[in-house]
Amino acid sequence: MPKKPNIIFIFLDDMGWKDLGCTGSTFYETLNIDRLARAGMVFPNAYAACPVCSPSRASYLTGKYPARVGVTDWIDMEGSMHPLKGRLIDAPYLKHLPPDARTLAASLHDEGYATWHVGKWHLGGEEYYPEHFGFEKNIGGCSWGHPHQGYFSPYGIHTLKDGPEGEYLTDRITDEAIRLIQSGEERPFFLNLCHYAVHTPIQAKQKDIDRFLKKAEAIEEKEQVLVTGEKIPAHHGSRVIRRMVQSNAEYAAMIWNLDENIGRLMQALEESGKADDTIVVFTSDNGGLATSEGSPTCNLPAREGKGWMYEGGTRVPLFVWYPKLVKANTCCRTPITTPDFYPTFLDLIGAADRLPQDLDGVSFLPLLKGEAIPERPIFWHYPHYGNQGGTPGSSVVLGRYKLIEFFEDNHCELYDIETDLSERNNIAAEHPEKVETMRAMLHRWQQDAGAKFPSVNPDWNGED
């Protein structure tokens, strides 16, 4: 029987689709990540299942769209931010992974895998931690969505012992992952490596920041870095600030450090003798943070960013490295989305017939082999106001077309994202039949998934 491959899933937090050298950034420097991407298959049309984090994480672990899982917004454990209100009131949502969820980790464990979670979890309180969903080890996973005490030790993360004062969290998480790889485990392993980076707070080592300061100054002398955007709903404030170029030295330093750590991880994998039997997947949980909270990055030409229904909110980097199967220097333009990972991994190890029957994801193993998969629609449902300025809506992509239905007034926008990635040319009026066809498709899917919707805000005063 062929040996089952080890699986390393590197899940970044808030990394935009253009935050790597290999995806088009000329400001950030990612030599190790770029090298790894070139040695595998890159997916330039990859999507996160939601424009914010927790729903994408729940989607990845269950193979289902967030609307079906019930986790449709980032999990606000304290209830300090939800529900947000504008013309509408946010839809209700689960603040934990459903206890009966059959997760990817549980399925892999049943197939003989050692299952390890390292890093961010953000899918509920202690009774919903990784160890309750098929993971044998949980290092650093808790209810937090970001490092509340910052990236330098003491972290205050109760599932991760504080390191020496000043230790950097991305270094530490990588150290823990390397220890597991080098542990002598004889079973194939599934390493769920979920860095807190590059989520706020934007903090990095001073020596790494210094590397980018002059580069940033040179850019900012030539470019208008921040502009004041149009008025947006009152839930957020009067205006939203957008970053128009990548020029934040601290954010660049966080990415530089992350890149160093990906290099260390791959070196340790090689030294362990396990590299030939390991598949590595690299992606992000949502688009880059470009319109609030310091607006540390820019996703242009993709529109907006985290918290928005536009491409900047959901388009993410994705590449797969597996020399035994995946040819180097290959690019696949078929759209892929977060729930696809679960069926793909089970298909990869010959366990596709043991998949849960209610998954939304589709195996893209044929793509990794250089074959094709049938065209299919990809759906989003975000019935919430984003902290970053976005408003509630749903969307669907089919082929070159993308339809967004906004819930405040139920208007639709239609874009040809093949020629208009920036989503500036709304062609809905020119293609009414396409709009109605795709809207009907979206509504049927919402009903099938049991999607919940925001309610009318009786206290709305009529002002945006």
Image (spheres, helix red, strand yellow):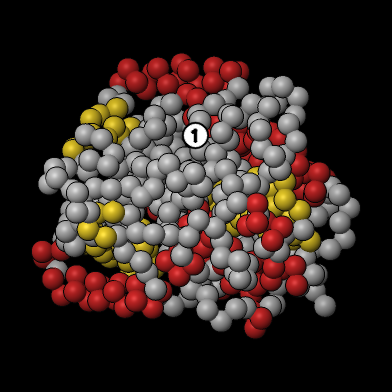
Q: Residues within 10 Å of mark 1 (few under 14, many from 20)?
A: many
Q: Point out residue 8 in the picture as x, y percentages from the top left corner.
A: 68, 55
> Which element is circle 1 on?
loop
Image point (52%, 79%), residue name: 358
Does residue 358 appear left or right of residue 227 in this picture?
Answer: right
Q: Point out residue 61 in the picture as x, y percentages from the top left corner.
A: 59, 63
Q: Using the image as rendered, state which of residue 226 and residue 419 is in the foreground.
A: 226
Q: Point out residue 126 in the picture as x, y percentages from the top left corner.
A: 65, 52
Q: Using the image as rendered, state which of residue 191 and residue 366 is in the foreground.
A: 191
Q: Point out residue 93 in the picture as x, y percentages from the top left corner.
A: 43, 60
In the rendered image, the vertical position of residue 237 relative to residue 320, given as above or below:
above
In the rendered image, the vertical position of residue 456 relative to residue 360, given as above or below:
above
Picture quarter containing residue 381? Answer: bottom left
In the rendered image, the vertical position of residue 387 relative to residue 131, given as above or below:
above
Does residue 410 appear left or right of residue 362 in this picture?
Answer: left
Give the quarter of the figure containing the C terminus. top left
From the image, tell me which residue sits under label 1.
Answer: 200
Image point (39%, 32%), residue name: 293
Indicate the amino acid at tag 1. Thr
**Could one spot residue 337 in this view of the protein?**
no
Does residue 346 appear left or right of residue 29 in this picture?
Answer: right
**Could one spot residue 238 in this view of the protein?**
yes
Does residue 402 appear left or right of residue 356 in this picture?
Answer: left
**Residue found at the very far front of the displayed protein:** 459
